[in-house]
Amino acid sequence: MNTPAEGRHRVVVVGAGFGGLFATKALRNAPVDVTLINGTAHHLFQPLLYQVATGILSEGEIAPPIREILRRQDNVEVRLGTVTDVDVTARTVTATAPGISYTVGYDSLIVAAGASQSYFGNDQFAENAPGMKSIDDALELRGRIFGAFELAELETDPEMIDRWLTFVVVGAGPTGVEMAGQIAELAHRTLPKQYRRIDTRRVRVILLDALDAVLPSFGDHLSTRALRRLHQMGIEVELGNRVVGVDATGIEVDTLAGISESSR
């Protein structure tokens, strides 16, 4: 990378997700010096996290190194760090990395730090129901999904086998629909011949949402088609169900008819 020119306009970009990365690339030919700060050394293609969680892709396939992506852009410096403070008066950004803290000055600041998992005020759910916003989240889910099949294979109690082969996905937006569909595909097409004691095709996949439609942001036509396809795949779609409790054995939902439970 070229040494920053004296007196050039300084741009600090916080976050190397889609917004931060595209903003950095858009400044490639501008007479500015860009400092890109990100908490990891890789960019993450979040829409494909569900494929890592279900074993279709490895993490490296959706998380290319930031430096590799920007290797031909001479006016950018990539720094590892989590931004802890922004001083708008002094126009500085303070960030920390393991064992070090540093400050970067800016003339223009672009904050594209992304979003965290939301449990709608029920953060205690995270202990038993991890989100899917990072590679670590996807790998945790992968371990739980495949671990459930392995534990079902070891069981002799039919009731416990059924519990291990029941998966509940909360949220019928794009990620939830994709995850539910992929678990069903995994159970019905990929895994049936890999286990001796269990029939993975007996899997129950339950998709819950507090709203009354799947993929509501896609419009009525696509929402209806998606719901029909989910039913064809054997996925139990339960709409109008708001999750009010989660523990290691199951979830509790609030429906129009009152409180009921759905296991695992």
Image: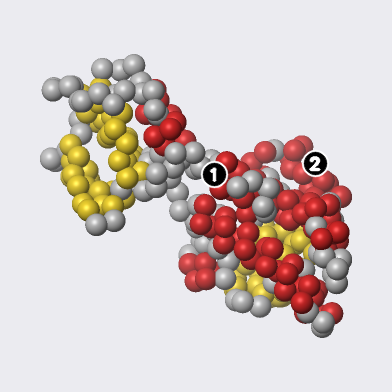
Q: Kindly identify the residue that appears in the image at 39 percent across and 47 percent down.
A: 40
Q: Kindly identify the residue that appears in the image at 13 percent across and 22 percent down.
A: 7
Quadrant for the C terminus in the image? bottom right
Q: CA distance from mark 2 to mark 1?
A: 33 Å
Q: Residue 204 falls in which quadrant of the image?
A: bottom right
Q: Residue 223 falls in which quadrant of the image?
A: top right
Q: Is residue 254 above or below residue 139?
A: below
Label 2 CA crowd tier, 10 Å (few <14, some 14–19, many 20+): few
Q: Position of residue 212 (x, y in %)?
A: 71, 53
In the rendered image, the residue lying farthest to the bottom is: 157
Q: Is residue 19 left or right of residue 222?
A: left
Element assignment for label 1: helix
Q: Residue 140 falls in which quadrant of the image?
A: bottom right
Per the rendering, the mark at residue 225 is: 2
Q: Kindly identify the residue that appears in the image at 64 percent across and 41 percent down.
A: 217
State how the image is colored: secondary structure
**Which residue bears the numbered disc 1?**
60
Amino acid under disc 2: Arg
Q: Is residue 117 left or right of residue 51?
A: left
Element assignment for label 2: helix
User: Is residue 183 visible in the rendered structure shown here?
Assistant: yes
Q: Position of residue 237 (x, y in %)?
A: 77, 57
